[in-house]
Amino acid sequence: MAEIIFRSRMDAKRFYEHLLKCLRFNPNDQDILLLEDRYIVKVSERKVNLEKVKHAFYNFIVKIKRDDWFRAILQDQYFFEDPEEQQHIMEIIYSVLEGQREDLSVLIKENGEESNIREAVEEIFQEHVSFSFDSFLKFRLRPYLKVLESYVEISIDEYKMEQEYQMFIQTLREFLTGREPKMDTLHLLFDEEVTFYDDKFKEIKRGELIRMIDRKLLFNHPVYVDSASIAPLLSIAPRNILLYTKNPEEPLVRTIKNIFEERVTIKPFKGLRVAMEWLQQENSANETGA
């Protein structure tokens, strides 16, 4: 009979229920027992496939306890006690774990998480008929917990940056509110650089854009406001922005969409040339008719 001893009654109960579910055992089956008074889970080695127990134990670590450890690190080391804040950071952590944030995952050294934990689980079951889960955690999984700390650290940094970005967006929206538009429609072409066109598709040169910039904007937000694109846009405050781009998810495009919201319409990159050609044809036809 193998037994796993827990320091927490809740952990013992959760592992017992997880084991029953993984092995599809009935709670009344005496081959897997939960001794709630002593926080022990007992498993009959003669009746229960030990390899399946090892696999369930591994999953208990990486799918159930990992969340606990992430939240404990957030609360105990970084003092994030608000559940909503914790949840936001947890979402960033899991986006990194699932490979959705390559820009962040590259900051964490390759750790061989799965193979290292499986090896530790294999060793503990070979060496001991009875062992303490918390001792196993302390002596065998210390490197793994360090890796979890790394995930939390970079995710907190990302969370803080996202909060700052949202405050920046909100500040610029407030600057825009009530501002009199200097132009009804503005065309923006995103290529190697951003090019401005008025409603007649006439290019607005750089010098003219600079003269349009509200100096209070650059004075109050010197670090965050891009003088080549965001500052002139906010200063002109057009009612409609037609934005032509090859990549709608480009960071600057997303920032303009976030600031100007429903004023922005995303167009295909070649759409500007088509529109300009159409206007030229219309003008030629009008001149001929006249």
Image (cartoon, grey):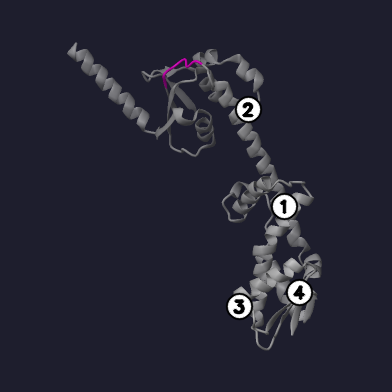
Rendered view: 289 above or below 277: above
Of labels 1 and 3, the one closer to you: 3
Give residue 110's position: percent from left, percent from top: 67, 58
Q: Is residue 253 above or below residue 15?
A: above
At x 19%, y 14%, the residue is: 288
Say what secondary structure mark 1 lies in.
Answer: helix
The answer to whether one can see residue 105 in this image is no
The image quarter containing residue 243 is top left
- Specify whether 258 is left or right of 282: right
| Segment tinted magenta in the rendering | 180-185
Q: Which mark is residue 150?
A: 1
- Which residue is farthest bottom? 46
Q: CA distance from mark 2 to mark 3?
A: 55 Å
**Total tally of numbered discs in the picture:** 4
Please, what is the three-letter code of the amino acid marked with disc 1? Ser
Among numbered discs 4 and 3, the one appearing first in the sequence: 3
In the picture of the structure, the residue carrying the numbered disc 2 is: 224
Q: Nearer the viewer, residue 153 or 5?
A: 5
Q: Nearer the viewer, mark 4 or mark 2?
A: 4
Q: Earlier in the sequence, mark 4 or mark 1?
A: 4
Residue marked by disc 3: 23
Task: Determine the CA span between mark 4 and mark 3.
Answer: 20 Å
Classed neighbour count for the residue bearing mark 4: other residues with Cα under 10 Å, few (<14), some (14–19), many (≥20): few
Q: Amino acid at mark 2?
A: Tyr
Three-letter residue code for mark 3: Leu
The amino acid marked with disc number 4 is: Glu
C-alpha span from label 4 to label 2: 57 Å
Q: Which mark is residue 36?
A: 4
